[in-house]
């Protein structure tokens, strides 16, 4: 039928309670057993394909799906190559947190069926790479590290695939964060840490852009907040060098170069030469 007639018919069915309007041009039937039309979808994931394609469920929502976390987040995290006007959208009473990504970043997904609707969700490896690329997608760097440790202890863990996905995403900060966090794990993997070291890009990044960088881990070219300098108990057993070698963290001294031997440098929790606790 003509678009105008279709719009009138749909509006009449909405008024009669047979349909609910989710957004312009998108409607859902109201189940006969439903007591209200506020939420008629059994799983809001089905909206991802209709509203945000090309894209997928990722970040903390994918981490929940793959049992990488026990925390429950209120919003659904979606990554999409579609232009995004609002990063937070409410559909059918459900909050969607939407991040725009490049089309080339859409890979490493799996199909999940919700009834007759297929939904794309990032696989465990891509989930880890995405939250390393943007820790806010993982609920912050503390939760990101917890997800990584769950991943490493799961049957899905595959560090070669993780490194390959990082190469494909082409975000240098991923390997800085991954190498640093792997070196803090109870059983550091030498091959994976070496692979991250070989892929370090120039410049310094923040462990979490949302947090202040307290000090510079020179090996990883990574600014980390205070309290993140503890050495992994597995480093010595793995025969790895200390990745916690720090650069200066004096106020106003970001990267003192040249001959600055008079400046105290914090190494392994002591002021070098003074042996004083910091």
Image: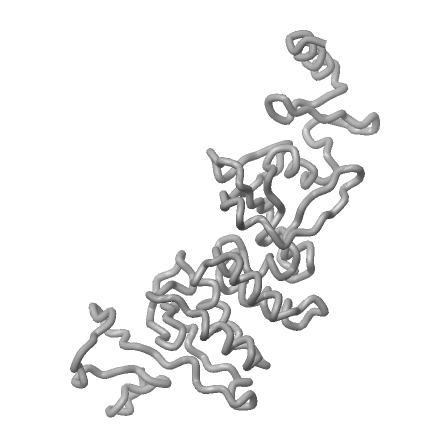
Relative to 77, is 221 on the left or the right? left
Q: Quadrant of the C terminus?
A: bottom left
In the drawing, does residue 75 fall left or right of residue 171?
Answer: right
Please state the horizontal and vertical placement of residue 183, each as a whole percent of the image.
50, 78
Note whether 99 is above or below 223 in the view shown. above
Q: Position of residue 196 (x, y in %)?
A: 49, 72
List x then y, in percent, for residue 252.
20, 68
Residue at 68% x, 39% y is 44
The residue lying toward the viewer, choosing from 124 and 167, is: 167
Q: How many marks?
A: 0
Residue drawn where x is 65% and y is 25% of the image:
26
Q: Position of residue 147 (x, y in %)?
A: 59, 64
If the image is split into quadrants, where does the N terminus sit?
top right
- Determine whether, in the image, residue 271 is placed left or right of residue 128: left
Asked which quadrant contains residue 12, the reply is top right
Please tell me whether residue 184 is drawn above or below residue 143 in the rendered image. below
Q: Quadrant of residue 79?
A: top right
Q: Residue at x 50, y 68 (%)?
A: 178
Q: How is the image coloured?
A: one colour
Answer above or below: position of 96 versus 40: below
- Quadrant of the rendered image containing residue 76: top right
Q: Residue visible at 76% across and 25% down?
A: 29
Is 66 or 178 nearer to us in this picture?
Answer: 178
Q: Seen from this angle, which residue lies furthest right?
A: 33
């Amino acid at each position: 039928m003509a678009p105008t007639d279709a719009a009138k018919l749909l509006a009449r069915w909405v008024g009669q309670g047979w349909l609910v309007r989710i957004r312009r041009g998108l409607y859902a039937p109201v189940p006969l057993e439903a007591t209200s039309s506020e939420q008629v979808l059994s799983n809001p994931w089905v909206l991802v394909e209709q509203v945000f394609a090309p894209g997928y469920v990722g970040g903390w929502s994918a981490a929940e799906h793959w049992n990488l976390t026990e925390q429950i987040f209120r919003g659904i995290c979606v990554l999409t190559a579609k232009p995004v006007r609002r990063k937070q959208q409410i559909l059918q009473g459900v909050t969607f947190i939407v991040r725009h990504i490049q089309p080339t970043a859409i890979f490493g997904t799996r199909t999940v069926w919700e009834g007759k609707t297929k939904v794309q969700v990032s696989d465990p490896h891509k989930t880890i790479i995405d939250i390393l690329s943007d820790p806010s997608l993982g609920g912050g760097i503390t939760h990101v590290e917890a997800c990584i440790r769950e991943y490493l202890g799961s049957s899905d863990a595959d560090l070669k695939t993780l490194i390959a996905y990082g190469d494909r995403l082409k975000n240098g900060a991923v390997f800085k964060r991954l190498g640093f966090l792997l070196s803090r794990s109870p059983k550091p993997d030498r091959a994976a840490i070496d692979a991250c070291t070989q892929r370090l890009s120039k410049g310094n990044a923040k462990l979490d852009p949302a947090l202040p960088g307290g000090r510079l881990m020179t090996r990883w070219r990574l600014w980390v907040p205070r309290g993140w300098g503890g050495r992994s108990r597995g480093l010595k057993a793995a025969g790895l060098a200390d990745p916690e070698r720090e650069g200066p963290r004096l106020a106003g001294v970001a990267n003192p170069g040249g001959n600055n031997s008079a400046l105290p440098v914090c190494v392994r929790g002591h002021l070098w030469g003074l042996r004083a606790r910091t």
